[in-house]
Amino acid sequence: MKRIYAILLAVAMISVPTVSQAQIYAKLNALYAVVGVINPQFEFIVGPHSSISIDPMFSPHKTIRWGDRNDIHAMCGILQAEYRFYIKREARGFYVSANAGMQAFDLTRPYIFQGGKFISFEQGFGRGFGLMTGIGIGYTHIFKERWVVDAFFAFDRMWSWYNDYFANGEINLFPRHQKEPKYPDPFNGSAEWLPSKIGVSIGYKIFDPTQPRKSCKQRRIEKMLSK
């Protein structure tokens, strides 16, 4: 993990002088927006094959309904920084990425392929914070010069520290620790590999240093001449 963070830090330090002159795309994850999750993204093109993306994500849902349950906690916030390497130039086509981030959450833990169900949830919920780092893949398509569609998926190692609560809101003084403490302790921790983000974003190039800014008068003249 330390090696991954060192690489990301080195990339960030090298890229800082060029960010002020970078092309900037502002995007919104349409897949998350459909279910009411806010996930804007800002991508800075810092080289012929390289970019840095800042991805804040916030789920405002205190509880949601799943099957016959309406008490699934789903509130969380994540902030990730990602370095992308594009196979082609000009930040288009396929890319691979490395990311690091942090999170805070009030979540009901999901389970996959357990109890005869594809997805199920524990009865209680947890509140805490965590760190993550991982890798991802994606594909970017640019159209109409400034518009972009970005499809992506990332898989991270996540370290979480939290308190467990029963469904009625009472704190669990005896959660399942890897090593049971001598005295009651509600504070717990875990580490696992999980998908950290998935989506299809639609974005627009909001800044391009290679194209000088035009005044309103110039744009009106160009529009009249194009008719």
Image (tube, rainbow, N blue to C red):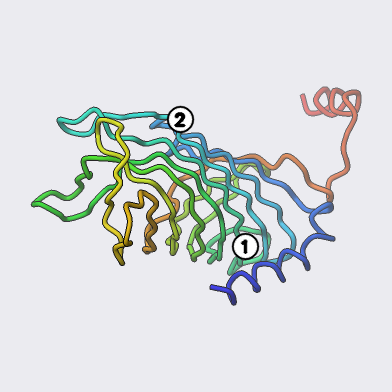
Q: Which mark is residue 83?
A: 1
Horizontal side of 196 relative to 24 (left or right) equals left
Q: Residue furthest left?
A: 116
Compute the Cα span from label 2 to label 1: 27 Å
In terms of secondary structure, where does tag 1 sit? strand
Horizontal side of 95 relative to 19 (left or right) equals left
User: For this rendering, which residue is in front, 224 or 92?
Assistant: 92
* As drawn, 192 above or below 34: below
Q: Report x, y in % for residue 90.
A: 68, 60
Quarter in which the C terminus is drawn: top right
* As drawn, 141 above or below 61: below
Tell how many labels.
Answer: 2
Q: 10 Å neighbourhood of mark 2: few (<14), some, or many (≥20)? A: few
Residue holding disc 2: 60
Q: 10 Å neighbourhood of mark 1: few (<14), some, or many (≥20)? A: many
Q: Earlier in the sequence, mark 2 or mark 1?
A: 2
